[in-house]
Image (spheres, grey):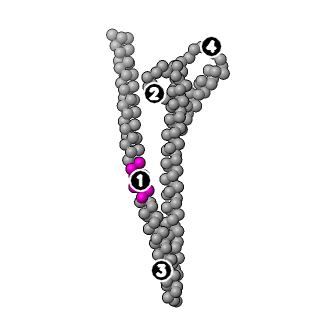
C-alpha cells in the first residue's frame, strides 16, 4: 500500500508539472531512496519504470504465493471434513445392533476408503509443507538480510544528519 502511494505521488507531481505548464525547471525525484550509477535526472523515467515494475512483480508474487497456500489450506480442510464425515457415518452404521455380514463388509469398505482419503491428504499436506519450508527459509533469510541492510542505511543517513548538525553548531556558535 505504501509503495502504491509513493508511485502515485511521484506520478501526480509529474502530471501537475505538465498540466500547469510552469516555465520552471524542476528536478525529478522518486519518493523512494535508491542509488543508481547513472544521471538520475536524465534517466528518471527509466528508473521510475524499473522501481514500479519491480514492486508490482514482487507484490504479485507475494499475493500469488499467499493465495496458493490459502487454496491448499482450504483443500486440505475440505478433504479432512469429507474423511471425518465418512468415518462418522460408518461408525453410526456400525453402532446399529442388527448388522449382517454384508452390512459389516460394506461398513469396513467405507471405513477403509475414509482412512485412505485421510492418509492421502496427510501425505500430500506433508509433501507441500516440506516444499514450502525450503522456500520460506530462503524468504526469511532474504527478509532478515533486507531489514538489516535497511536499518544500516537508516543508521548511515541518521549519522550523516547528526554530523551535519554538529558541524553547523560548531561554525555557528564557535
Q: Which residue is the site of mark 1?
A: 131
Q: Is residue 4 above or below residue 137?
A: above
Q: First in sequence: mark 1 or mark 3?
A: 3
Cα–Cα span, label 3 and label 2: 66 Å
Q: Nearer the viewer, residue 72 or 93?
A: 72
Q: Is residue 97 above or below residue 158?
A: below
Q: Which residue is mark 4?
A: 23
Q: Residue at x 48, y 19 (%)?
A: 39
The residue stretch that appears in magenta? 127-135
Determine the residue positioned at 43% across, 23% down. 37
Which residue is located at x 51 percent, y 52 percent?
68
Tell me which label, 3 or 2, sits earlier in the chain.
2
Which secondary structure class fits the magenta region best? helix
User: Of marks 4 and 2, which one's residue comes earlier in the chain?
Assistant: 4
Cα distance in 3D space between marks 1 and 2: 34 Å
- Do the residues bearing badges 4 and 1 touch, measured as CB atoms within 8 Å? no
The x, y position of residue 66, in whole percent, is 50, 49
Can residue 30 be seen here? yes
The N terminus, quarter of image: top right
* Mark 1 or mark 2, earlier in chain: 2
Mark carried by residue 15:
none
Image quadrant assignment for residue 5: top right
Of the two numbered discs 3 and 4 on the same chain, state the one appearing first in sequence. 4
Question: Label 3 belongs to which residue?
Answer: 108
Q: Secondary structure at mark 2?
A: loop
Q: Which residue is mark 2?
A: 34
> How far, Cα to Cα, is label 1 from label 3?
34 Å
Amino acid at each position: 500500500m505504501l509503495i502504491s502511494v509513493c508511485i502515485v505521488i511521484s506520478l501526480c507531481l509529474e502530471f501537475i508539472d505538465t498540466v500547469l505548464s510552469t516555465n520552471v525547471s524542476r528536478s525529478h525525484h522518486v519518493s523512494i531512496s535508491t542509488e543508481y550509477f547513472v544521471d538520475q535526472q536524465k534517466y528518471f523515467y527509466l528508473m521510475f519504470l524499473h522501481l514500479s515494475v519491480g514492486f508490482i512483480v514482487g507484490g504479485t508474487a507475494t499475493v500469488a504465493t499467499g493465495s496458493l497456500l490459502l487454496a491448499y489450506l482450504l483443500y486440505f480442510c475440505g478433504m479432512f471434513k469429507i474423511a471425518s464425515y465418512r468415518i462418522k457415518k460408518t461408525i453410526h452404521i456400525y453402532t446399529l445392533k442388527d448388522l449382517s455380514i454384508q452390512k459389516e463388509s460394506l461398513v469396513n469398505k467405507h471405513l477403509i476408503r475414509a482412512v485412505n482419503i485421510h492418509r492421502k491428504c496427510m501425505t500430500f499436506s506433508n509433501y507441500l509443507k516440506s516444499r514450502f519450508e525450503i522456500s520460506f527459509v530462503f524468504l526469511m533469510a532474504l527478509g532478515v538480510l533486507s531489514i538489516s541492510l535497511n536499518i544500516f542505511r537508516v543508521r548511515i543517513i541518521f549519522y550523516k544528519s547528526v554530523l551535519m548538525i554538529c558541524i553547523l553548531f560548531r561554525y555557528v556558535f564557535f
